[in-house]
Amino acid sequence: MKLAFVGYGSIAASHARSLRDAPGVEVTWVVGRDPATTEAFAREWEIPHWTLDLDAALASDVDGVIITSPSDLHAAQTLACLRAGKHVLPEIPLATSLADAEAVAEAARGGALRVQVAHTQRYYPGLVELRRRVEAGKLRPHHLVFRWFFLRRENVNWKGRRRTWTDNLLWHHGGHVVDAALWVLGQEPDLESVRAQFGPPHPELGIPLDLDVQFRAGGVLVNVAMSYNSPWPRHEYLVIGEEGCLEYRDGKLWGPEGLVHDPAPADAILDQDLEWFAAIREGRSPAASPDAVLPAMRVLGAAQAQLAAGA
């Protein structure tokens, strides 16, 4: 299978590194916005062709496209790839508006092309085990409390690389967390229950750096707290259940008695990408298809509407 990358940031390098272990996969094109950095990425990862023109790559014999460009471009570029007859793996977020997410889902629905959205947390072994326990009835949740805090007051990415675009706390990182909550529970959200509050916009970035989102899913209370203002990084998912509590933290599951599940190391990006390849081969919908992640996007859309209304 021949692939093109659209974008050359840190997450593109993670895909390139993981795909070295994928048999029968060859990355033959990379599409970027700056000639020097696009060519440098192609050289580093031994990609034979590079271009600044997405249409040029789509006119080639590539079978699929991995989109790792700025978040606001994901939906339009995914639609362009589908129109060109290519399978697509867009990085999270699928879109930065509910209308665009629904448009991509509609375009992908029922066709022969496979779209797998990069909701990589669905492939974290610790979260897979947490979902398994909930599915098996070993932990019947009453309340989920998810915290995701880190410091991002400048346009830099998770590896310290300066960006020319602004990340989106709600649609990008909120997309990770809200989808993880719904996926662990295996429930649809009650959209009427969504309540959101936001901090003030940052004077330079123009986006709120703090937010809280609350909603119900299958009767379970879900609370999401997020911040780009915290110099103390936190990535903790606490599930309070009838039988006790479990917390996902540092890739492991913890209970009141201490460590309860320490999974073997895994490459979640590779596992996610392999699911996309398998869906293409088998002619089926991928696990994280646009339709599968739309429930999370609808929660984010309801929160965005409250931000726009000044709630």
Image (cartoon, grey):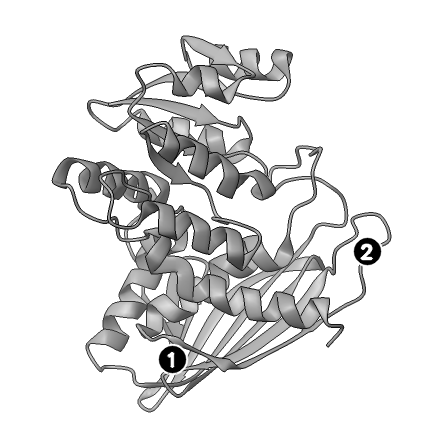
Helix, strand or loop for disc 1: loop
Residue in view at x 56 percent, y 21 percent: 32
Tell me residue 79's x, y (percent): 43, 38
Q: Is residue 6 visible?
A: yes
Q: Is residue 2 left or right of residue 4?
A: left
Q: Is residue 240 above or below residue 284?
A: below
Q: Which mark is residue 257?
A: 1
Q: Secondary structure at mark 2?
A: loop
Q: Can you say which quadrant of the picture contains the N terminus?
A: top left
Asked if disc 1 and disc 2 are in contact, CB closer than 8 Å, the reply is no
Q: Give percent across and percent down for residue 276.
A: 27, 40
Q: Nearer the viewer, mark 1 or mark 2?
A: 2
Residue 229 position in % (x across, y down): 74, 59
Residue 225 is at least partly visible in this image: no
Which residue is more in the foreground, 231 or 289? 289
Residue 162 at x, y percent in the picture: 70, 33
Residue position marked by numbered label 2 in the rendering = 202
131 horizontally vs 208: left or right? left
- Give the quadrant of the C terminus: bottom right
Instruction: Name the amino acid, label 1.
Output: Glu
